[in-house]
Amino acid sequence: MDSHKGVLVCGEIAEGKLAPITIELLGAGRKLANDLGEELSTLLMGSKTGGLGPEAIAYGADKVYVAEDNLLDQYNSDAYTQVAADLCRKVLPSIMLLGHTDVGCDLAPRLNGRLGGGLAMDCLELSVDPATKLMASTRPVFGGNAHATMVSKSARPQMATVRPKTVPAAERNDSRQGQVIPVEGKIDPSALKVTVVERIKEAVEGVKLEDAEVVVSGGRGIGNAQNFEMVRELARVLGGAVGATRPACDEGWTPVTLQVGQSGKVVSPKLYIAVALSGAMSHIAGCLGSKVIVAINKDKEANIFSVAHFGIVADYKEVLPALTAKFKELLSK
Amino acid sequence: MSPTGVSYWGIPGYVIFWVLFAIALGLFAQRAYFLFRLMRLGKPENRFDRIGQRIKTMLVELVPQWCTLKTVTRTDRAGIGHALFFWCFALFFISYIIFIGLAGGFGLSSLIERTPFETVYFSILDIAAALVTLTLIVAAVRRYVIRPQRLEPTAEAGFILMMVFFLMVLHVFGGAFDHAARGVHASWPPLGGALAGLLRNAGLSQGTLEAGYRGVWWLHYLVILSFMVYIPRSKHLHILASPVNAFFKPLGPKVVLEPVPLEGVETFGASKIQDFTWKDLLDLYACAVCGRCHVNCPAQLTGKTLSPREVIHNLKEHLLEAGPGLLARQTEASSESPSETQARTEPKAMIGNVVTEEEIWACTTCGACQEVCPVNIEHIRKIIDLRRNLVMTQSKMPESAQLMLRNMQSRGHPWAGIQSMRLRGDWTSGLDLKILAEGDNADTLFWVGCTGALVERNVKATLSMTAVMKAAGVDFAVLGDAETCCGDPARRAGYDFQFQIMAEQNIDMFKSHNVKEIVTSCPHCYNTIKHEYPRYGGDFKVVHYTQLIADLIKEGRLKLTNELNAKLTYHDPCYLGRYNDVYLEPRRILQAIPKTKLEEMERSRATGFCCGGGGGLMWIEEQPGTTKINQMRLEDVIKTGAETVVTACPYCLQMFEDSIEHKGLKDSLKARDLVELVEAAMKQS
Amino acid sequence: MNTIVCVKQVLDPEIPPAKFKIDPEAKQVIPPPGVPPVISVYDERAVEAACRLKDKHKGKITVISMGSAKASDVIKHAISMGADDGFVLQDPAFENLDSFGTAYVLGKAIQKIGGYDLVLCGRQAADWGAGQVGSILAEILGLPVITLACDVQAVDKKVRVKRMVNDGYEVVEAPMPSLVTVSSEIGLPRLPGGMGLMMARKKQIPVWKAQDIGAETSQLDKANAHTEITALSVPTRKTECEIVTGGTPGEAASNLASKLIKLL
């Protein structure tokens, strides 16, 4: 256990650049490394990583391990697990951080299983006790009804997947110094059992949900597919993204990719407008990180009002058109 | 000389008479037997209890024509016409037996014909013939000129009207020719006598008159025989089938649902026509296609594709089409192997081919169809049997139904957890109530029901109920957290298994607390526990709160002294009204409340229009139509000018709150549960 | 095609938030009275995935659940959906295990059952939601693993899985036997039909103890736990919701927009 030192961030590359989550992880990782008094490294896997190493250093990494291979071009479960696990066994980090993304949700448990560490997923808060060198990870449980703090007393590495947009991103400092270390070893293609057959990008109308500054979500109370257009219209006017609750997706009013909630996307925009949704904990779990939550629901007892900052108790059909119109007017000024 | 006493082309008239009769009877019997065998394809069902009462019911429906007189309303008085027609034609029918059968067939004409008896009887028949003709003309004008919604201007109906008219004409002409040929001058029978005069003055020879008489007589006889042959081959089969159907009508609860067997079956509910019981198939024969069900069905009236008339009609057509194949399986000699026969004669699945899913899921089980049906057809159980097949065998149902049934299974109630924001026993907090724990006993149990415990608006009514009972000194207990659903939504949606599990659990629970009497606020719980639980071993005295409160007022245990100054109307819940004939008690309660003016809706009591919440439709999405059922009902309320619509059912209350809000009338129209008014009228101690 | 499905019985996730109570000392959740536990949301979908495969390819579905004696209810629920057999894994040594411990026990049971082409799990448990058991289990059993499935098909000797990813979905294949964790996007699980309910009613569910599956208690020693919970709390959200009003809902909307415009 004592042989494990330092913080290793398993970064993600998106469209040839460091994904925003990576920059957030570097921010969180830097703080943990400082508290530990140890190094912060990051692992970048891809087919073309040139230039990203120095960028990671500028964001706070002391060492950047770069694994370049055509087989790593897109996320491949077996390949990434193999490369990351091999590196971990060499580097022996005390703490390992990944993003709670579809990559992280697949990679982290597998790595954990292979390395025998201790993993806490979907963390909202991470801290290190400098005395014990133990990381405490706080994560939502029971659909967000409670928070649990987890600790791995002896299992190493201590792993955590961090929820996007919950920890502040690292600040860029191009004068920082660090090392870029290429990772050796070829990946054996025959060892890759899981193969990707095809990837389909679902054309998402407008802004991407996870990145949006404004999200307008509709719930079961919208009532039918036609009326969901009112939600979309408001989102359009605000330059935001459309979200939905699980029941609304189940009804087929929006594609499942727009589901916000415990089993859907977790978003933390500046403004989250919840329209005609009751506010089941499993949905709130997906939007609680929003700076300002607004609820529009005709039931004044709806749970969403208990987490909203502003609300209107009325039928959304009577509110949305006026709201959209007023926003349009104010934004055109 | 009776026309049968003469020979024609060397053949004695009697011979011709009986040969014709034999042929007609044979054709009639063949068809009747065929239909009987088809009916027997259905599953067994025991409707042979209380034979005495059944005979009485049948005679009352038939003889004084209660079957159609019970359907007479201010706007539809056709039942009177039918009764009149029936009685008159019954007289004719008797005359056929006497004057054609006995006189002609058995050669007793000398005893019967040209007697004062004949004169009197024929005079009566003349009047009857005029009345019959009148009813036929009115019927024809209604069906083909006025064209009310419920009547279809079919060729078949027209043919029957013509045939009957023809019989009247032939009867009168027959008598007339007879008199003219015999040179009888009589003023009685009036029509016959007058017509005889015309014939005499027409200058026809004696021979022509005699030939005319014989000709008309035999033509008359032929038409009668053809009619006999035609009856079982047309919708006039109802003449034979409906008295039988009246005999077998349900004597207890109006909707008799057979429990689904838990063992030894491969499919559930009705998939093929032979999955119905013989009684269901008999219903199809009894239908006279009168269309009353069609124009009273809330689904049909709000533009859904469901029409009870069409369902029954299509099932009947399907039975006649698929039946012969099924019967063929029973015959021995065949060149095919049994499996080949099986495959060739397999009836098509009813769902999708004879009745559509959209029709099946549109039904609120309100019972209006059964209430107005003159021939006692049981429409509802067929719909539920089809739902059982969809849900329990095919696992096919609207998603809203699936979500509700999943909730029934995992949570024991139909209201989705998070939406309700409360747990089962929450409503009791802060109240001084006797909540039954294990081992406790209670004589009277107040059964709250899922809606009354879990839905905000309805909890208010539950609280009113406990306040009223306490004020009246009723000693009652509640189950609190331990109460689960009575099972009604699952049963109506066709998920009978789940219903049975819940029913058995509830019965065990009642028995473990030695409960004797159950008081409930929900008519669905009331109906289910009272009428359907006994089948599973649960026999309790079940009371709806309106019955209890009406009694309490009568006994003076409840004094309503606060003036409410309300102009209100009362909506009869289907499961309290039509299903259980509880119409008076709620009205008595309203009468006892000072300063309330009750304005009845046009469609009330037995003709009350459904709120749209029954049959599982409180949760199952309404099928596409022109408007929603609850919105149509609200129009009835608005017409009365009432400020408050009062009801005694949690579903109805929800439906009115919803429609009032939808129409934007929240400020001028209130929906209230009757018990809330009672509490408000009680002197607060 | 034979499948084994791992299911967990959890506290009903749809209890009203106001009713959710914890014991911070024991770091446990106190279940509210009268609320029956349910099958974990994702595990039920794993059963649904198995049933869809059985509809197409026939075969046997075995369901296992590590939990209390009441866990037989979720096994029966799975059987009523279409599973053939089930076992409850119950032993004092199985209580309060972390993800590794759980995966170990499940792995032992799966090895005892044997003869499978596919193991299906939910992506995470609807209660503690650690989200790792499936992947660790795959590692123990040496199986290829695919996570977050929203559709599972069997093609030739491979499992073909559709996974939701960030901006769409991908189709991934692995040779069988393999392990797949299932997400909620697979759709609404089927309502148990009459036949299934009949079967479940009759079925006796055997209980396996540690010795029945060859689980060594040394492996289950709590001291060897990889993670432990040091604190459990209910987050207090200090939000006073400001209800915006107006003469009409339209006016209220106008007022709201005026308040929010400074955020944009």
Image: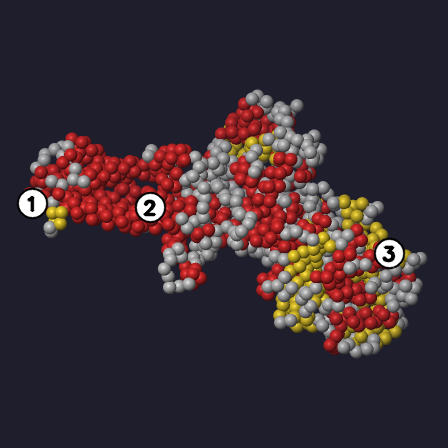
Q: Can residue C30 be seen in this view?
A: yes
| Mark 2 surroundings within 10 Å by alpha-carbon count, few (fewer than 14), some (14 through 19), many (20 or more) | some
Residue type at tag 2: Leu
Nearest the eye: B249 or B201: B249
Residue beneath the point at 71% across and 72% down? A193
* Left or right of residue C80, residue B532 in this image: left
Quarter of the rendering occupied by the C terminus of chain B: top right
Residue under mark 1: which chain is it in? B
* Residue kind at label 3, given as amino acid type: Ala
- Check the image and name the residue furthest to the top: B556
Q: Identify the amino acid type marked 1.
A: Gly
The location of residue B552, given as percent across then percent down, is 57, 25
Spatial CA span between label 1 and label 3: 124 Å
Name the quadrant containing residue A197. Answer: bottom right
Front-most of residues C255 and B448: B448
Please give the residue where the numbered disc 3 appears in the rendered image: C223
Q: Residues within 10 Å of mark 3 (few under 14, many from 20)?
A: few
Q: Mark 2 points at which residue?
A: B237
Q: Is mark 2 on a helix, strand or loop?
A: helix
Q: Which residue lies furthest to the right in this view?
A: A131
